[in-house]
Image (cartoon, rainbow, N blue to C red):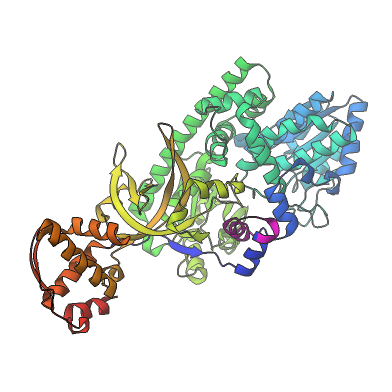
C-alpha cells in the first residue's frame, strides 16, 4: 500500500559475541547488541563506555611533544612573556581558544588570543597575522585546532624570533612543521591511544598536562562545559575520551558556571530544566557561534566565553543570535536560488553529481547550502561562488561515494582542493566549471554503485511491539548521550495501524496510533502519507524511541523515519481453529441475542471469549466459506449480518474454492 522511502540495512550481528558481552558485563541483550553495533567490543572499551569517569582520561603526557610544550609554556610564565593562543574561526577553534585563555589567565599567565577573519585572512595561520603578533611583542604562539600543515608559516615565526607550539587534530601531511613542539594524536609516531579528539579535546589535554605540572588539576574540570560544545560541534565520535567529556558536561551545563554559555543557551530558548543533548548543542548553540565566523568577527565567540559580566555576555549572545538569523536568511536565499537553478537547468536523472555556481553567493554559508542540496536530492553536490573569475566552494557527498576521489580525478582543473570522503573544498577558474560537472558525472557513472543514490537507514534491531515501553527506553538510556559514533538506536517494529491522520498547522506531519498498546508514532514532514494509510493495515515502521510528556503523563512514542504499510494476506486466510471459533461464537450469540450481528461485535466477542486478535477480513472470509459450503446463509447490509446456521452438516474445507484461492494468495 505504501512502500518504504529508504533502503533498510540491518547491521550484521554475531549472537555469540553479543551474548558474551551481556553476560560478562551484566547488561541486557539489547544493550549488548547496541554496543556491538557501535563496535564497542573490548572489555576496556565497554567499561569505559558504560562508566566514563575522570579516572579513565588517558595520561596527557602520552601525546608526542607534550612534555616539551608544557616546559616552554611554564617558562613563559616564569619570564613574564606574552603568550598568544591562535585559534580557528569555527566552534572548535573558538572553544579551544577560550578554555586555554581562561585557564592560563586563572593560573597567572600573560595571555592573549588571535582569531583570523574568515573572509579577509582565510583558513589557518597566515604570515600577516604572525607579523602583527610580533609587532605586539608576542614571545610564544600556541595554536589550537590549526597549524598541522603550516610549514611555511612556522619558518616565518623562526625568522621573526617567535616560538610556536602547534596543537591540532587534523590529518598531518607528509611534512610536519618544524615548530618548537607539535601535538597532534594523528601523527604517525604518536603513541596516544585515542586519535579522535576534536581540536578542543587536544587543547584540553594540554591544559590537563599543565595542571599536573603546576599541581592544580582540580580547577580544570569545570572547563568541560566548553570542551563539550566544541567536541559536539566538530562532529567527532562520542566514544572514549570524547564520551567522558560530553557525559559529564551534559550533567553540569544546565547550571553552567560560564556566564557566556548560560546567556547563549538562554537566547536559543533553552530552559535550565531541560536535558542537554547533542541536538541542543549541535543545532542551537553551535550555529550561533559559527555564524560569527561565517559573516564577520569570530573573536566575539571567545569574548562571550571569557567575559564574566552577565550584562556584557547577554549583549554578545544577542549579537550572535542576530548574526545567526542573518546567516539563516542568507543561507535560505542561496538554497532557494540553487534549487531553482537545478530545477530549471539540470536533468536530475542524468546527473549523479550536482554542480551549481553563481556570482551572487556568500562564501561563508555555501558549505551549509551544499549539505542541504545533498539532503534534498540525495546526490553529491558542489556549490560554488564566483568572484574575479575564480569559482570556489564546498562539496558534500552521500554514504558510499567518496567526493574527494571524484574531485581528485579532476585535479588538473583545480587551483587547489582538499577534503575527505564526505566533504571537500576547492577553487578553479570559472571557465572550467562546465568541464568539471561533465567529468565528475563521468567518474560517477563509472564508480558509483547502483543503489548509492537511494537513501539508507541502518537498523540496530527488530523490536517486538511489547518492548515499545518506558521500561525499555530507560534500559537503553545507558547509551546516552548520543551523537557521532554513538547514534540514537534505530529500530524496526512490525505492528498494525489503528489510526492515521495528518497533524500540524499545515497538516504536514503524520500521527499514527499503532498496535494493541495504541502507541503513538510521529513522522515530521510526511503528513501526505495519511491519505494512503488506514485502520487494520499491517506495517513495519522504522524509527527511534522517545518519551512524550503531556499534562504530567509520560508515554513512549516512536519518532518515525520510514514506514512500509501493506495488507497482510496471511492474516486474512482462516485456519481451522478460526472456523471453529467463529462458528461457535455465532451459535452462542444467536442463542442469547438472536440472528442479527455486526462484524465488529462478532470480532469483539471472539477477542474476549478466546483471547485472540482476529482480523476483520478473516471473519468475512470465514463467513463466505461457510456460505459456499452451505453451513450457513446470511445477508450483509454494511457491517450488519443477518444469518441462519445449519448446524448438523459436515463438510471438507478443502472443497471450498474460496479457501483454496486464499491459500494461493499468500
Q: Quadrant of residue 634?
A: bottom left
- Residue at 83%, 54% in the rendered image: 191
Let me know if residue 527 appears in the view.
yes
- Judge by depth and name the residue closer to the eye, 290 or 95: 95
Question: Residue 451: x, y in percent?
Answer: 45, 67
* Quadrant that contains the C terminus: bottom left
Question: Residue 494: x, y in percent?
Answer: 40, 60
- Judge by depth and name the residue closer to the eye, 57 or 547: 547
Asked if residue 158 is among those painted magenta in the image, a careful observer would answer: no
- Residue at 28%, 65% in the rendered image: 567
- Residue ranking furthest to the front: 591
Asked if residue 32 is among those painted magenta in the image, a careful observer would answer: yes
Residue interval drawn in magenta? 23-39
Left or right: residue 22 compared with residue 437: right
Q: State the count of labels.
A: 0
Question: Residue 663: x, y in percent?
Answer: 26, 78
Q: Is residue 425 above or below residue 333?
A: below
- Judge by depth and name the residue closer to the eye, 436 or 235: 235
Left or right: residue 229 compared with residue 378: right
Question: Residue 282: x, y in percent?
Answer: 56, 40
Q: Is residue 410 above or below residue 547?
A: below
- Residue at 57%, 41% in the rendered image: 278
* Quadrant that contains the N terminus: bottom left
Q: Is residue 654 above or below residue 161?
A: below
Q: Quadrant of residue 247?
A: top right
Q: Main secondary structure of the magenta part?
A: helix
Let me know if residue 640 appears in the view.
no
Left or right: residue 608 compared with residue 226: left
Amino acid at each position: 500500500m505504501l512502500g518504504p522511502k529508504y533502503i533498510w540495512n540491518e547491521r550484521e550481528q554475531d549472537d555469540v559475541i553479543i551474548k558474551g558481552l551481556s553476560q560478562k558485563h551484566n547488561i541486557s541483550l539489547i544493550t549488548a547488541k547496541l554496543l556491538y553495533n557501535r563496535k564497542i567490543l573490548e572489555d576496556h572499551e565497554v567499561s569505559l563506555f558504560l562508566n566514563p569517569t575522570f579516572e579513565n582520561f588517558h595520561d596527557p603526557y602520552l601525546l608526542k611533544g607534550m612534555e616539551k610544550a608544557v616546559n616552554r609554556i611554564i617558562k613563559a610564565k616564569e619570564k613574564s612573556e606574552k603568550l598568544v593562543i591562535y585559534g580557528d574561526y569555527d566552534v572548535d577553534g573558538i572553544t579551544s581558544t577560550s578554555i586555554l585563555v581562561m585557564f592560563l589567565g586563572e593560573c597567572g599567565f600573560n595571555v592573549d588570543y588571535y582569531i583570523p577573519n574568515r573572509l579577509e585572512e582565510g583558513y589557518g595561520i597566515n604570515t600577516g597575522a604572525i607579523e602583527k603578533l610580533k609587532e605586539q611583542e608576542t614571545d610564544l604562539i600556541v595554536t589550537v585546532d590549526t597549524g598541522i600543515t603550516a610549514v611555511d608559516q612556522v619558518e616565518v615565526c623562526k625568522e621573526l624570533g617567535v616560538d610556536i607550539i602547534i596543537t591540532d587534530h587534523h590529518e598531518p601531511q607528509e611534512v610536519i612543521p618544524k615548530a618548537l613542539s607539535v601535538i597532534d594524536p594523528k601523527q604517525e609516531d604518536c603513541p596516544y591511544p585515542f586519535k579522535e579528539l576534536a581540536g578542543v579535546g587536544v587543547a584540553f589535554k594540554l591544559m590537563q598536562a599543565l595542571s599536573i605540572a603546576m599541581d592544580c588539576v582540580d580547577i580544570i574540570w569545570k572547563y568541560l562545559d566548553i570542551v563539550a560544545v566544541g567536541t559536539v560541534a566538530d562532529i567527532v565520535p562520542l566514544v572514549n575520551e570524547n564520551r567522558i567529556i560530553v557525559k559529564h558536561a551534559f550533567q553540569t551545563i544546565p547550571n553552567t558556571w560560564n556566564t557566556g554559555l548560560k546567556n547563549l543557551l538562554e537566547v536559543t530558548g533553552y530552559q535550565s530544566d531541560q536535558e542537554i543533548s547533542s541536538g541542543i548543542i549541535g543545532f542551537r548553540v553551535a550555529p550561533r557561534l559559527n555564524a560569527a565566523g561565517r559573516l564577520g568577527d569570530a573573536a566575539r565567540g571567545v569574548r562571550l566565553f571569557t567575559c564574566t559580566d552577565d550584562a556584557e555576555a547577554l549583549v554578545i549572545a544577542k549579537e550572535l543570535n542576530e548574526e545567526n538569523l542573518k546567516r539563516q536568511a542568507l543561507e535560505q536565499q542561496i538554497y532557494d536560488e540553487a534549487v531553482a537553478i537545478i530545477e530549471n537547468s539540470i536533468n536530475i536523472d542524468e546527473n549523479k553529481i550536482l554542480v551549481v555556481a553563481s556570482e551572487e553567493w556568500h562564501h561563508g554559508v555555501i558549505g551549509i547550502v551544499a549539505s542541504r542540496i545533498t539532503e534534498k536530492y540525495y546526490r553529491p553536490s558542489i556549490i560554488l561562488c564566483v568572484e574575479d573569475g575564480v569559482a570556489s566552494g564546498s562539496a558534500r557527498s552521500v554514504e558510499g561515494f567518496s567526493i574527494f576521489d571524484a574531485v581528485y580525478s579532476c585535479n588538473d582543473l583545480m587551483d587547489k582542493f582538499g577534503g575527505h570522503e564526505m566533504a571537500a573544498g576547492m577553487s578553479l577558474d570559472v571557465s572550467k566549471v562546465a568541464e568539471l560537472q561533465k567529468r565528475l558525472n563521468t567518474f560517477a557513472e563509472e564508480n558509483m554503485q547502483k543503489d548509492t543514490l537511494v537513501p539508507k537507514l541502518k537498523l540496530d534491531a527488530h523490536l517486538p511491539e511489547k518492548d515499545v515501553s518506558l521500561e525499555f527506553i530507560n534500559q537503553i538510556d545507558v547509551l546516552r548521550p548520543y551523537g557521532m559514533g554513538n547514534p540514537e538506536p534505530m529500530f524496526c517494529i512490525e505492528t498494525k495501524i489503528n489510526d492515521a491522520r495528518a497533524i500540524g498547522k499545515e497538516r504536514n506531519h503524520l500521527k499514527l496510533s499503532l498496535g494493541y498498546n495504541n502507541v503513538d508514532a510521529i513522522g515530521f514532514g510526511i503528513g501526505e502519507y495519511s491519505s494512503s494509510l488506514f485502520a487494520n493495515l499491517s506495517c513495519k515502521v522504522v524509527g527511534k524511541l522517545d518519551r512524550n510528556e503531556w499534562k504530567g503523563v509520560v508515554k513512549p512514542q516512536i519518532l518515525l523515519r520510514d514506514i512500509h504499510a501493506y495488507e497482510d494476506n496471511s492474516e486474512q486466510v482462516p485456519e481451522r481453529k478460526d472456523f471453529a471459533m467463529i462458528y461457535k461464537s455465532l451459535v452462542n450469540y444467536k442463542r442469547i441475542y438472536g440472528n442479527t450481528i455486526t462484524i465488529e461485535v462478532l470480532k469483539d466477542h471472539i477477542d474476549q471469549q478466546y483471547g485472540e486478535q482476529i482480523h476483520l477480513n478473516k471473519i468475512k472470509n470465514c463467513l463466505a466459506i461457510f456460505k459456499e459450503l452451505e453451513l450457513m446463509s446470511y445477508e450483509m447490509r454494511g457491517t450488519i449480518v443477518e444469518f441462519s446456521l445449519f448446524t448438523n452438516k459436515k463438510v471438507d474445507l478443502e472443497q471450498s474454492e474460496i479457501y483454496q484461492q486464499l491459500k494461493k494468495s499468500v
